[in-house]
Image: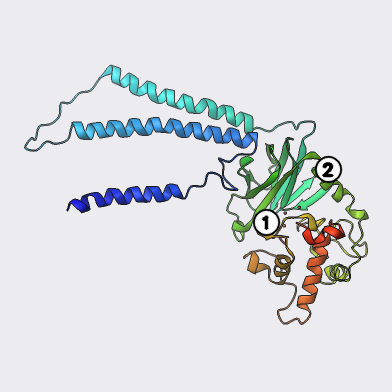
Amino acid sequence: MQTHRWLRPAGLLSLLALGLSGCEFAGPQSIFDTAGPIAEAQRDLFVWSYQLSWIVVIGVFGVMGYVIWRFRQRKGSDAIPKQFHGNTALEIWLTIIPVIIVIAVAVPTVRTIFATETRVVPDEDAVIVNVTGYQWWWRFEYPELGIVTANELVIPTDRQVVVNLDSADVLHSFWVPRLAGKRDMIPNQNNQLHFTADEPGEYYGQCAELCLGAHAYMKFRVIATDDAEFDAWATSFQEAADRTVQADPQIQQGEALFATKGCATCHTIDGYRDDVRVGTPDFPNLTNFGLRNTIAAAVVDNTQANLEQWLRDPQSIKPGNRMPAVWDTNDPNADEEIAAVAAYLRSLGVEPATQTQASIGANHGDR
């Protein structure tokens, strides 16, 4: 009996320890490992509110424990504890303390909301990006730079980034935990979010609003670089129309197959041959695809093997996406042609000497 008396508390403590051990405070999507002033302000507000909540927890459970112990039924006694009411001093304190706690939470909350949630007039050197959410990929347009890309948002560090958020279909939510909080993307409602990255790096983002189908795979990356790298990246897009296809037989075969297999019907590549119809804004723009780190809306790394598998069987990488399988499973030329198209796509924006290292993210088509 004595063993069983301690079994339940020990089990509860073990469950609590297990729960806490699953907490991640420094992961790629941790709100505690901040990398920008907006995320830092939101984290500080959370921590402050959490600390204040302990006053409530300790107070409530302390009083409850005291009452349970002080007024417990004693053996052999059926006496009712002394009843009292109308204790003015007690009632005043029970009113004042909650009011103080509410004020202590409300004031910094309102201040943080106004500092981080309101629409802003962009700084003179701010980077403005129009972000559109699709099922299940992201379109990034830099209107002042004339750049359209997908699934990887490249930004300079220490400069304000203002994103105008819209949805092409259902509700989505833009969230980069280490840079800023969530913001809903609603069709025809231009919501806005602004943030700054303190240091270069790759920051994980995702859709935080259930949007059916491949929602769990609707990811993206924010790539923060210094000004020089960002300018070079932007220039590579602005000069894309003047770039020629690399003089490699496999890459040139892939370019031809990109047209004949119907890829160009959906996907745009800036500077693509004038004699071939280009795609539409409702599918990912593949300009400079070789500079991306990831494919399939940041589900897997942009490697030759992953891209070939994506082209061969998109559902095996991203279940529920709308990218069609172009090659039949019994097509004898499938392996050769898929490898050629993959090589062509990975060559876009990449110098020949560095193509094998290409990796600087990708539905209706999802790439």
Could you tell me which residue is drawn at 83 percent across and 65 percent down? 344
Tally of marks: 2
Disc nearest the viewer among 1 and 2 = 2
- Front residue of 158/327: it is 158
Pinpoint residue 57: horizontal percent, then vertical percent: 37, 34
Pinpoint residue 207: horizontal percent, then vertical percent: 62, 51
Looking at the picture, which amino acid does disc 2 mark?
Asp
- Front residue of 136/254: it is 254
Q: Is residue 2 above or below residue 310?
A: above
Mark 1 lies on residue: 298
Q: Is residue 69 above or below residue 349?
A: above
The quarter of the picture where residue 252 lies is bottom right
Looking at the picture, which amino acid does disc 1 mark?
Ala
Could you tell me which residue is drawn at 80 percent across and 31 percent down? 124
Give the side of residue 221 with respect to residue 12, left or right. Answer: right
> For residue 231, which numbered disc appears in the image?
2
Could you tell me which residue is drawn at 43 percent across and 23 percent down? 100
> For residue 78, which numbered disc appears in the image?
none
- Does residue 277 show up? yes
Quick one: which residue is furthest to the front in this view?
Answer: 353
- Does residue 143 show up? no
Q: Earlier in the sequence, mark 1 or mark 2?
A: 2
